[in-house]
Amino acid sequence: MAKVTLKRIAAEVGFSEATVSRVLRGHGRRYRIRPETEQAVFEAARGLGYTHGLSVFKPKPLRTRTLGLLVPDLSHHFLGLLARTIVAKAGESGLAVFVCDTQEDTETEIQRIEQLLEQDVDGLLVLPVGKQWDHIQRLSHRGLSMVVVGRITPEVQCHCVGVDNYGGACEAVEHLIGAGHRRIGCIQRLPHSWISEERVRGYRDAHARHGIPVDERLIVGDLYGQRNGYLETKRLLQMDPAPTAIFALSHLVTLGALRALREHQLAIPGQMALVGFDDLPNVDYFDCPVTTVRQPMEEMASLAVSLLLEQIESEGNVSPVLIKLPTELVRRRSV
């Protein structure tokens, strides 16, 4: 069988040998090579049986004993804790982790991925920004060892580990409805993110199951943090009629809501019920311990690292799995 050369691949796809070489060495983005060109080169190389020097085309067993971890916002309580938990789990296997804050920006995420690949990490753990998956999909097509954490999507051919955000939101709102509430405010975190959409969908469907129409004015919020929860709670309290309960879609939003309710001197749960999401450690120390949806952080981190190691050590010969972990509603005194 004739040796497969760069010249032969170039002739197959109709691009220059230089372009083919850059793509196969994982430098396509650096040289502004179009994604469809990269994909064509990889498919041609795979079809011709080319294997030489494909650092991003075919996964290798652990060599550098380093992983890359991309997180949208390390200052966010839950994401910061999750990142530390992942680093600890990787450390138990003797691996070091390069942690990158992608600043809730897709372009920054793409740049950090390229930088990590240049560091020759053995694999990537990605908590993606937003809902743009094209660059993640391209990485999976290139055969890079990678696990997507916190998102579940069949569109990407790699392992995904996340939680049932929809189910957790349904259970939280069902709990409020069961306590007699019919006007429930919903404060989002980044409304166009996949996670917020899943939680709002759960909020809507819980209402539908009980035949309760959703007042669209009760779904508010367009920012990420504590200030969002504070301002939107004050806005909800100005409505006529005001809600009798609030569902806050993240820990920071919950903190902001608590501050606003305290300023308005509203008793929890006597005058306003409150349910949050994430269940971070300090919720037990609030003036009124808050009912929250708990995410299985330890299990998610452990599974993500284990799946990535399995993929690396098998040199990519494993089928992608999608794991959706159940949440738990931790009932306290705020409802």
Image (cartoon, rainbow, N blue to C red):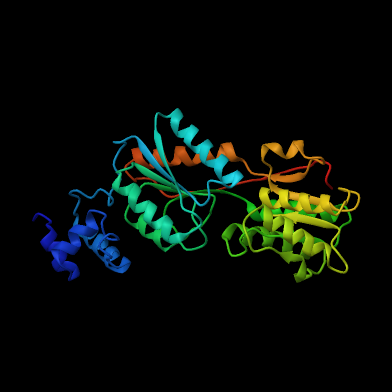
* Residue 179 locus on image (x, y percent): 87, 52
Asked if 285 appears above or below 182 in the picture, the reply is above
* Residue 208 locus on image (x, y percent): 77, 65
At 77% from the left and 44% from the top, the residue drawn is 291
Name the residue at the left extreme.
2
**Viewer can see residue 144:** no
Asked if 33 appears above or below 314 in the picture, the reply is below
Q: Nearer the viewer, residue 242 or 139?
A: 242
Asked if 11 appears above or below 273 in the picture, the reply is below
Name the residue at the front extreme.
263
At 87% from the left and 69% from the top, the residue drawn is 240
Q: Nearer the viewer, residue 138 or 185?
A: 185
Q: Does residue 233 appear left or right of residue 82 in this picture?
A: right
* Residue 235 locus on image (x, y percent): 78, 64
Question: Which of the 4 quarters of the picture holds residue 67?
Answer: top left
Figure disc tally: 0
* Residue 255 locus on image (x, y percent): 72, 48
At 69% from the left and 51% from the top, the residue drawn is 168
Asked if 1 appears above or below 81 in the picture, the reply is below
Q: Point out the image quarter for the N terminus.
A: bottom left
Q: Does residue 159 appear left or right of residue 179 in this picture?
A: left
**Viewer can see residue 290:** yes
